[in-house]
Every structure is written in C-alpha cells, then in structure tokens.
Amino acid sequence: ELKVEQNPLFLSMQEGKNYTIYCNYSTTSDRLYWYRQDPGKSLESLFVLLSNGAVKQEGRLMASLDTKARLSTLHITAAVHDLSATYFCAVDSDSNYQLIWGAGTKLIIKP
Amino acid sequence: DTAVSQTPKYLVTQMGNDKSIKCEQNLGHDTMYWYKQDSKKFLKIMFSYNNKELIINETVPNRFSPKSPDKAHLNLHINSLELGDSAVYFCASRRTGGHEQYFGPGTRLTVT
C-alpha cells in the first residue's frame, strides 16, 4: 500500500528564516505534487515534479524530487507571513488515476 | 472563468435529512473526484469517476452515492445525514494521463 508521510506536521517559524518540509513515500513513483491550502480555502497546485532530480522554484519556495530516495522537499527561503498555510504533498498511485496524499504540514510564520 | 465549481458552498442541515452537492468542471477533464476533509485537514478520497464510470469507491457508508450524468459533472447525494458527516467536501478533476488535480472551492457541510 502506498503511503505518503510528511514532516513536520506543524511548523511555527519566524519571518526571514529558512526551513524545509519533507515528504517521504513508500513505493516507486516519479510524479509528485505540492499543494497549498489557505484557511477556509481550496487546494491550489504549487509544483508538479515529474522526474528524478526535478527542481521547481516559485518565489521563496523551491521543491525537489529524489525518486531513488522516495523523497521530496519543499524549501522555504527567508519566510514571510504570506506563506502561512497548510502544504500537502501527493504522489501518483500509478493506478486508478488516484493521488495518495500526505497529512499536510501546517506552517505558521510569525512576523 | 471558474474551472471547477461546486454548489452549495455552505450547507447546514439536520440529522436524518438527505442532501446533494453538485460539481461541474469546464476544463475538459475526464476524471473527477470527491474528497472529504475533516477538521484535522486530512484529505480522504471518496469516489472517482473516469468518463462517467466509477473507478474508485473507497470505504464510505452506502448513504453516500455519487452520480455522473456526463464527463463534466459529478454530484454527491447523501442520505440520512449523521453528525460525523460534517466536513468540507471537495470536488476535483484531472485530465487522464495528465498531472495535477484541480480542486473546486469546497462545500462546508454542517450536520446539527
């Protein structure tokens, strides 16, 4: 059974600091997705990582994928308050068109 | 233009009632999903349809019945609502062989 684990599940940090959210998954997959959810809002796609070594960057966020280690990271550089949200990673199950979701990481960035 | 839309956005109802949530996507996608998100924000897949055919039917009570009249619509009917059904329900769609799922705005269901 494919499992996706995120850590940490909760992260409180100061503005200006750097931090990394980790997403581990339990089977071979070369397609991984990061989503952002603001409180009371829907999920918004952030990054689509489709191959080993893929790296995507958008502003202060950078995501990478290591399919051999079955690990993706979401790195936050010089955090700002506007990045406060819950971040989810999800992995293609290779069957049934299904994504397997992590539990989400709630990120709070204090001014 | 709205890509994935859901109605209603909020739904407050009493235990035992029957209610429906509607979802429509104008992206031309052929796979649609229903998710339940509980208060702890965990996302649980409930159903998935591909070209109007049910392909995922996770362990949910049979009080929940999805219906897909065409590829652009996936509705969710819930019978005999219970307190534990209170959650946010998200519809999503995806292009077969494509990549990310696109989510609707969610329907916050409160059962009293």
Image: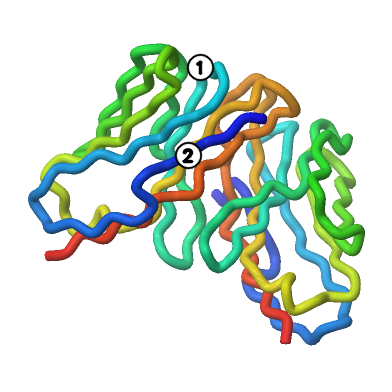
Q: Quadrant of residue B109?
A: bottom right
Which label was assigned to residue A93?
Answer: none
Along the line of sight, the residue nearer the viewer: B32 or A27: A27
- Which residue corresponds to the image point at 88% horizontal and 82% vertical from the top-left? B16
x, y percent for residue B25: 68, 45
Q: Which quadrant holds the C terminus of chain A?
A: bottom left
CA–CA distance between discs 1 and 2?
A: 16 Å
Q: What type is the residue that disc 1 sits on?
A: Asp
Q: From the viewer's perspective, is residue A69 above or below residue A47? A: above
Q: Position of residue A101 (x, y in %)?
A: 55, 41
Q: Chain of mark 1?
A: A
Sequence-wise first label, 1 or 2: 2
- Residue with the mark numbered 2: A5
Which amino acid does the dot numbered 2 rest on?
Glu
Q: For the N terminus of chain A, give its image quadrant.
A: top right
- Name the chain under label 2: A
The residue under label 1 is A30
Residue at x 39%, y 54% (from the top left corner):
A86
